[in-house]
Structures are given as structure tokens and as C-alpha cells.
Image (cartoon, coloured by chain):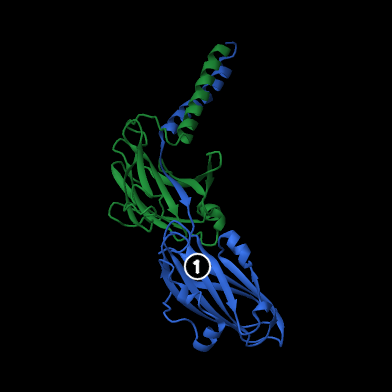
Amino acid sequence: MRNPKILVALLIPILFISMGAYSYAHFTDLVVKKYKLHVKCFMVDITSYKAVSRYDDELITKNPPDDELAAMGGTTTISLSTNKAFPGWYVWVGLLIQNKGDFPANVNTPLYSISDPTGVGVHTEQYFYGPFAHADFQNAWGKVTWKDLEQYGPPSGNVPPPVTLEPYGDDYKNKMVLWIYLELLNGAQQFQVHIEITVLATSI
Amino acid sequence: MATLILPILLIAIGSTAFAEFIMTARLTATTTAESGDIAIEISGWKIESTNTIDANGNGVTLGDELKIEGVTDGDGKTIELGITVDPIFPDWYLNLTVGVHNTLVSTPVTLIRRIFYFDSNNNPVETDVAGLLSLFRIKYSDKWYDETGQPIPDITTYEIWPCHTITTLESLTFDGQNYPELQDQTFSFMIEIQAIYPQTGG
């Protein structure tokens, strides 16, 4: 205790720090809301598709190819390509769509993405069929040819979108068919085009 | 002199540690409420609206796909709500009102809302509304109301007196339509409401 003044000068701030910290602890309080969320997005997939046209179908490249799509089990986006496109070129695209998820979903008008380096315009029409709870979609799917489509137009019995698909049952259930008429409006006399079609599903 | 200073230093360090402990141990506020202490609690909650679905088709959603459970401290105060939703899906939403009550034994307080998410090690990391959107595609907003139902424009300056309750309406929407990478992910975050003694000035 040779210098009591120094001792006091040390003690006072230390005491204030300890009192202040203790007081601070009592001058706050908390409540919290803890969220835990598990995401399950829709699993509405194209399980099969066809592209038919009076212009040689062999000139249309499908991606994914049929065997690859079968191995994948389904996809939400398919693409078509040809280097023989011209103004007025058209294709009918049929999509067999299935809900493979755990809860119902609405299928709406798809998204189109056209690569058009020459500024190609496009005209689309969509025709929705379903939902089909069993293997009763053949009239709108399996038996349809490009000649039918050209001569008679899309199959009868189409419904306005959206189509509500119940959750996955088995391979024959909870499907719908979407027929798309897609026509290129302009462009060069012959050009390459790449068309992507993406199926959209939303909550009910 | 050292024998005097050392215990005082230990007391100071202990007090600071205690303060930090109370600040960070969010779910274990072990202080006993006495006159002059701040003490708030969750006084109730209500689901205003949601489109949470009956995913398993058992006819029950609340308590099944959507669970809300209160957690109390040793004094019986509800200090936490655990909200679990499984599944959520694009365009899923929840509008939830929660009452925050300033207890009789407390002092006037103002509130601060902070947001944390839990990282892979379950440690809370502070974020904000924009962070919730970029991390989890959760659009979050909240509004505050006094006991008469009038909106409170700024909760950080609104004084809540003891024995009074304010209500927060928080809205969450999952904007995950174009984010398939979130499929089957589970994420957790926390909305913390901290009561402090009203700050003067400013």
C-alpha cells in the first residue's frame, strides 16, 4: 500500500466494469422464433415426347433422345433442333407429363426458348388433355399421327389449363398430355433453329 | 495489493462473461425476474394463413406438416417458438402473428429484431432479410401492431410498458420455383426479438 491513490484509481474502474456488465445482463431479454423448413419441389416431368411434322421428322434432332429419357425417368425440359428450318416451318410437339412428386401440382403453359440468331418469330398453341388417372390417355397420345394433326387438328377433348395432377401412383396414373403447335414465322430461306420447351408446375 | 486486485479482476471478468452468456445463450435466460429487470415473453401465436399442404393425406396439417411448439424457461415464460414445416414448395407461404408481452415485473423496453441462420455446424450466423432470400429463397417481412391494432412504424423506438403486449405479423414465402438445387434441402433460421432498455436521444 505504498501508493493508495494508484490502488483507488485501479479499483474504481474495475468495480464499474463489473457492475456495468452485471447490470447489462439484466437489462436485456430475448425471445426467438426458430424455423426449420424442408423443401420438396414439384416433380412434374415429361416422361415421353414426340415431335411430328410433315417435313421430314428425321431432320429434327430430339434431346434427350428417347432411350436416354427413358433411362433418366423424366425431365422438365426437352429441346428440338433442325438445320432445315424456314419461314412457315412448323412442328407438333406432344408431351406426356406425369406428377412423380409427393403432392398435387398444377401444370400450366410451358416456357419456350428459341435460339434465333436471325430474329425468328414464333407462334405457339397449346392443347391440354387430362388428368388421366389410368391408362386412358391413348386417344390423345398413342394413336395421334402428324396426318391426323394436319387433317383434323389437335385431338378433341382438350381442357383449359392448368391441369391438376395428383401425386405419383404408378406408371399409368396421374398423367396428362400436352400438344403444342409451334410455327416459325420468319427468318432466312434455310436456317438452323434450336427450340427448348420447359414444363411449369405450381402449387394448387 | 495483488491479493486485492486479483479477486476484483476475477469478479469483473466473471460479470462480463455472465453478461455475454446471457446475451448469447438465447434459449437459456436463467435470470430471475426482479423489479427493474427486463423480462419479455411470447404470449401467444396464431396462423393467419398458409397454403401448407396435407402431403401425407392423413387429413391433418397443423401438428403434422406444420408444427408450432412453444418452449418455456424455468419460470414458465414462453421464450421460443419452434416452427417446423415439411414440406415447403415453390410459392409456399405462412403468415403468422406472435404476441410479445413485456411482463409486469419488467421495465419499459424497446425491441430489436435480428435474423440468424444456422450453418452446417448448427452455429447461428447473423443475416438479414436479403440474406434469407439469397440463401434460402425465403421472402421475409414483418409488421408490428400495438394493443389497439394500430401499426407501429418503427419497433426500435416504440416503448412497450410493463404488462403490455405488441403483436408481430410475419410473412414468409418460398420463392424457389427456379431453384431446383434446393430440392430436398432442410434449412433453419431464427428470428430473434431482443428487448432492451429504451435508448434516449437520436
Image spot of residue B87 (x, y percent): 44, 52
Residue type at mark 1 is: Ile
Q: Tag 1's secondary structure? A: strand
Q: Residue at x 28, y 42 (%)?
A: B163
Above or below residue B91? Residue B106 is above
The quadrant of the rendering that contains the N terminus of chain B is: top right
- Residue B82 vertical placement versus B36 (above, below): below
Res B201 seen here:
no
Q: Is residue B162 left or right of residue A160?
A: left
Judge whether A85 appears above or below B77 on screen.
below
The image position of residue A91, as x and y in percent, is: 59, 81
Q: Quadrant of residue B41?
A: top left
What residue did someone put label 1 on? A97
**Colour chain B appears in:** green
- The residue shown at (53%, 72%) is A95
Number of numbered markers: 1
Residue A40 position, x and y percent, is 48, 54
Relative to B121, residue A196 above or below:
below
Please provide percent x and percent y for residue B180. Answer: 55, 58
Disc 1 sits on a residue from what chain?
A
Residue nearest the observer in this picture, B163 or B8:
B163
Q: Nearer the viewer, residue A174 or B25?
A: A174
Which chain did the image draw in blue?
A: A
Q: Residues within 10 Å of mark 1 (few under 14, many from 20)?
A: many
